[in-house]
Image (cartoon, rainbow, N blue to C red):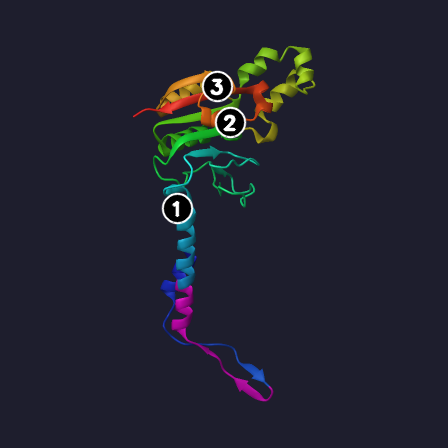
Amino acid sequence: NSIKESVDNYEDTNVETPQETTGSKIVKKQHDSSVVKQRLQKALENRKNKESSQTNNVSSEQRNKIINVGCGDKSFPNTDNIDFPIIKWWRKNYYGMDLRFKLPIRDETYSSVFCEHTLEHLSPSEVEFLLYEFLRILNTNGVLRIVVPTLDKYLNWIENEKLLKKFGFLDEAHAVWHLTQHYGHKSTWNFVSLRALLINIGFREIKLLKRGTGDSNLVLLENSEREWESDYIEARKIE
């Protein structure tokens, strides 16, 4: 907008610059306003083209039908990978996006959405908005697979001293802190809470699965090292 405003408000008059001294001569330079205005207009067009290109890279007839949301340091071939722009943006098939806001992706673009250990880094209201976005960008009968640390598994072993030590915790409080606050966690989930939210948003056929079961294209993206604390949930967009 600032460039456009500069173009619109630029007056068609010659602007006299400060005087410059070359030896004993005083030289006055004048800038043709039409040249400056053309340059400003070109800068505006270049910026618009760049923004349009960034959006169309994902929202047009894209190469991949699977999108990996919250990819972190892992990006997969044959998959579009998105995460906050601070992540390594130069990787192949990676797009930096703020997951708290509307994704620059057209409706019904993907057949599958994969989201692993990402929702806990968002507030409950941000999670709800992102799940609505998942529903929007999925094709009819598209599959959403969520992997998230679950309160249920923590409750199952939190009083077991051997398991606490196995998973690297000092005590129960340390485990609760890891689930609810460590690594910038902002929300805590289990299957019951996510199922209720998914139903309210419009997803159907919501299932709690074991790691490695479910949609064959999505289970290959999972990180097996987080199984001890994770729920594996699939839901479908039904017309």
Q: Nearer the viewer, residue 85 or 11?
A: 85
Residue identifier under label 3: 213
User: Please, is residue 62 above or below residue 135 in the view?
Assistant: below
Q: Magenta residues?
A: 23-41
Magenta stretch: includes residue 56: no
Q: Earlier in the sequence, mark 1 or mark 3?
A: 1
Side of 182 where 9 appears, left or right: left
Task: Tell me the distance, in whole angstroms, between the alpha carbons under discs 1 and 3.
Answer: 33 Å
Q: The residue under label 3 is which amino acid type?
A: Thr
Magenta stretch: includes residue 30: yes
Residue placed farthest to the bottom in the image? Answer: 24
Near mark 3 (Cα within 10 A), the count class, few <14, some 14-19 or many ≥20, is: few
Image quadrant where one finds the N terminus? bottom left
Residue identifier under label 1: 56
Residue 149 image position (x, y, % from top left)? 54, 22
Residue drawn at x 36%, y 22% is: 200
Asked which quadrant contains residue 224, the reply is: top right
Is disc 3 placed on a helix, strand or loop?
Answer: loop
Image quadrant where one finds the C terminus? top left
Is disc 1 placed on a helix, strand or loop?
Answer: helix
Disc 1 + disc 2, Cβ < 8 Å: no
Residue drawn at x 58%, y 31% is: 184
Task: Tell me the distance, in whole angstroms, between the alpha carbons under discs 3 and 2.
Answer: 10 Å
Q: The residue under label 1 is which amino acid type?
A: Asn
Q: Nearer the viewer, residue 8 or 236?
A: 236
Single out the mark in the foreground, 1 or 2: 2
Is disc 2 placed on a helix, strand or loop?
Answer: loop
As drawn, the label of residue 220 is: 2
Asked which quadrant contains residue 21, the reply is: bottom right
Residue 82 image position (x, y, % from top left)? 48, 38
